[in-house]
Amino acid sequence: MKLLAVSDEECPALWDYYVKGRLADYDLILSCGDLKAEYLTFLVTMGRAPLLYVHGNHDEHYLRKPPEGCVCIDDQLVVYNGLRILGLGGCLRYHPGPFQYTEAQMRRRIRKLRLALWRSGGVDLVVTHAPPQGLGDREDPAHRGFEALRELLDRYQPQILLHGHVHLRYNLDLPREHLYGSCRVINATERFVLDLPDRQVPLKEKDKLLWKTRPPRVRDTSIWDS
């Protein structure tokens, strides 16, 4: 399964200078936040692959006009083609805003997902806006990472965490990827491409039916392909 991750900066090659078919190879698009809603709508329309997103700290405009055709996975665990994906947007609070959280608030958000994580048997990929503390963050108040996200990695040991928030062009010495145990922590600023094997995790039939009426905590998004 080929994934396209985007964050923070619109990629000219995928928008301003888009060439027909450039998005055709991607099976799933993931946004880590702080992108124009029109950009995400364009990607999901031209790519014809599902687009899942979390909010960045500058995404207040999504409250008025969210990206069309895209699915917000903030505070949700979804399963797509067997890949278990957890969404936790926002950044560490440095001034008032709807998508800024204290450490205590982020820990509370994660605790509310424990049942979903238990039901799914864990998580493979975490999509965040801010990085974990000490793994690609910076020391200034606006770009510090969450200690709570490091705790999440320690407890559930996902394969990958994708984040944005820290623009790589602001610090050319900052690596795009960190390894924390067996987890790849990847800064998806502008764009990053991943090739992952499908992991078939069948859900119970009642969960599939429930998705059609009232979204459960563990969402089976494979029905999008039907």
Image (tube, rainbow, N blue to C red):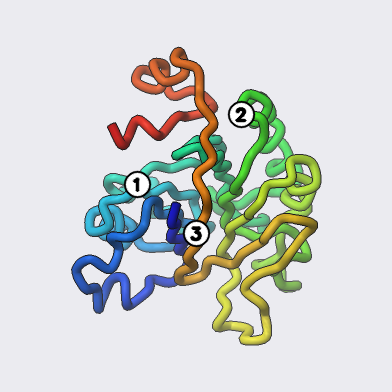
Secondary structure of residue under mark 3:
strand
Secondary structure of residue under mark 1:
loop
Place residue 9 in its image quadrant. bottom left
Q: Earlier in the sequence, mark 2 or mark 3?
A: 2
Q: Which of the two discs, 2 and 3, sits closer to the camera? A: 3
Instruction: Report the residue at 74% width, 48% height from top.
Output: 153
Q: Which amino acid type corresponds to the residue marked 1 in the rendered image? A: Pro
Relative height, residue 76 to residue 16 (above, below): above
**Residue 211, horizontal then vertical, whole percent:** 40, 22
Q: Do residues under tags 1 and 3 come within 8 Å of each other at their CB atoms?
A: no
Q: Which amino acid type corresponds to the residue marked 2 in the rendered image? A: Ser
Place residue 113 in its image quadrant. top right
Instruction: Say whether residue 152 is left or right of residue 172.
Output: right
Q: Residue most toward the left?
A: 20
The residue to which callout 3 is attached is: 195
The residue to which callout 1 is attached is: 50
**Residue 172, horizontal then vertical, whole percent:** 62, 86
Q: Which amino acid type corresponds to the residue marked 3 in the rendered image? A: Asp
Secondary structure of residue under mark 2:
helix
Nearer the observer, 65 or 10:
10
Instruction: Report the residue at 75% width, 42% height from top.
Output: 104
Q: Earlier in the sequence, mark 1 or mark 3?
A: 1
Instruction: Report the residue at 32% width, 50% height from top.
Output: 49
**Residue 202, horizontal then vertical, whole percent:** 51, 26
Nearer the observer, 222 or 139:
222
